[in-house]
Amino acid sequence: MCLGISGFAQVPYLQDFEGTNPPTGWTLTNTDGTGWTFGNTAAISSSYFAPPAHTTFAAVNDDAIGQSAPAADDFMNTGVINNIPTGAFLSFDYYFLGGQTSLGTSGSAATLPYELFNLNISTDGGTTWSVLDTPPAITTNAWTTAHYDLSAYAGQNIMLGFEYNGGDVWMYGLAVDNISIAVPPANSMQYLSINPATGTPASYVLAGNTITISGVVTNLGLNPITTYTVKYTDGTSTVSNVKTANISTYATGTFTITTPYTTALGTHNIKSWIEYTNDATHTDDTLHTILTGASFLPTHQLVVEEGTGCWCGWCPRGAVFMDSMKVVHPTGVSLIAVHDKTGGTDPMAITVYDNGLTALPNFTGFPSIVVDRKEVLDPSQIFDGYADHNPDFAFADLTLTATINGNTMNVVTTTKPAVDLNGTYQLALVVTEDSVHSTTSTYAQHNYYSSSSQNQPLTGAGHNWQTSPNPISASLMWYDHVARTIVSTFNGQASSLPSSMTSGSTYNYTFSNVALTSTWKQPKLTAVLLLIDVASGNILNSKSVTPTVVTGIKTNISSINAVNVYPNPSSNYFNVNIDLAKSQKTTVALTNIMGQVVFTKDFDFNTGENLINISADQLASGMYTLSVVSENGIHQTKISVVK
């Protein structure tokens, strides 16, 4: 057959799976009883294999099959495609996450590669096959297009085979769509991408500074591209650059426009296009981006929200990597552990927060981390998420002061946008607590890393999880970054910010009388302010502080007999003698008059007197509050540094 496709000189073959499936003349060999199926994203997807929307496509979903019957080796072969024309290329879209390539030395299929995608070809009607290529796994969560020169098969009749090998282990899968064989036009060029793209960090600069525009182009024609022109305009002035190149068919080339764009305050719509002699089509020659000049560059404190639960045996992984992030970036990240109750009983779960987090796109299960509500990752990828999003433009500087009076907290906030913001933006207040502890059995942590369960190595967050039992009893567990409340919804407080905000102006809002539960250890609380773009759901910036306790300190100190500090005042060190009624885990913290924690450490103290030393070498002169937090009480003492 001959189908007319814009931009191609001749299209002898096209299969997009929008008709009867499997297509007439095709054969499927499904060794696991499921194998190749046809459908859209909703029909094909599962938790760990969810191809982005692509109308109807062919796929093997190894994840949905499960460990009991994984895909061993599944084939999808076309019928005979007659008389391949001279100059023809094979093209198809595919989605292939790719797994490991070897099972090692154990397992019944140890000698087989797995999670393998082979593109096979036959010239004798399917009697014999050879491998044309092994397409690589994708590097982003998107479909990609593969192209193959079929010049060696001109005039022949061929069959194509798409082979997925899951290696008899539970892996991901393969999806294929839009298989075509076509002869490209002599000359055709596509403007593939422009940098910086709208909304990316590089698209924001301090007003008056310059932004360099670059991009990627593709040769969709048979003739190599040796010269072309690239231009851009902001509607007032136009910049033009002639580029030399050597770009073969279906290859890509990059360019940089030598004259950068000087960015004034505000947003600027940039149109950019390419000009190429005898280009067969011009519908793919133009791209747009928005460049923004800011009145200042806000300090970004990104947010990592961890989906976790006591019932979740793999969730210790989340605790370990959250703890690692705190150690490596102690002030650059707001860490929030959102406990979930749907998978079992977790007394730290907050329904409104849990429901909001688990409803985010691409949230597939526990444990997971969500970075600025832009990306959902496995906890082991937390530093990748930080590297990806820490450079993001933060839109506004945030400040807040938090004070605790009895069992209520008042938080005064200021938002200062660096660019004009128009739309629905809201502030959310999250209160977190460290060292959450209880001997109640529901606080026990399930632990699949245990040698009594899956026997996997994992160390961190205060445990060697492999040598620990499953579950770890509540008496041995302390949970950090635990979300205790969020005000007032997952997307924040309505009307906390106006619908129109001007760059450089300040906007104040107070969260008044936020209720605190009496069992929360107040020196272990953190107030976290989130700036949320409701339209996108993204968190744009955050700020966190330790609240100042002004009154209402817990008086239940029955397990603390006495706390004595000497010398006081001091210029270089303090001896702290803590007399306890029983052995217990105890936290000692030091806060300055701004409520900032300048020292904190957990101790396993014995019954009776316990002596520790706190250095004052790095402390400025002034008054500090020393808090000794036991399992059922707090003792606070004022100390003075004099230098």
Image: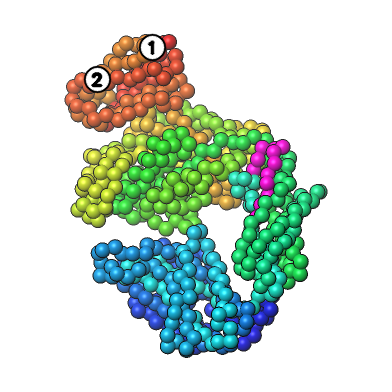
Q: Which mark is residue 410?
A: none
**Left or right of 458: which side holds 469?**
left
| Front residue of 593 and 237 | 237
- In the picture of the structure, the residue carrying the numbered disc 2 is 611
Give the image location of residue 456, x and y in percent. 26, 52
* Image coordinates for residue 484, horizontal then vertical, percent: 40, 40
Residue at image coords 68%, 49% = 213
Residue 56 at least partly seen: yes
- Given the current orientation, which residue lies at the most extreme right position? 236
Q: Marks 1 and 2: CB-CB under 8 Å? A: no
Measure how far apart labels 1 and 2 are at the Cα level. 19 Å
Say what secondary structure mark 1 lies in: loop
Q: Which residues are magenta?
A: 204-215
Q: Position of residue 557 (x, y in %)?
A: 27, 24
Q: Residue at x 31, y 64 (%)?
A: 103
Q: Amino acid at mark 1?
A: Ser
Question: Which residue was labeled with disc 1?
Answer: 571
Reply above or below: 369 against 9. Answer: above
Q: Residues within 10 Å of mark 2 (few under 14, many from 20)?
A: few
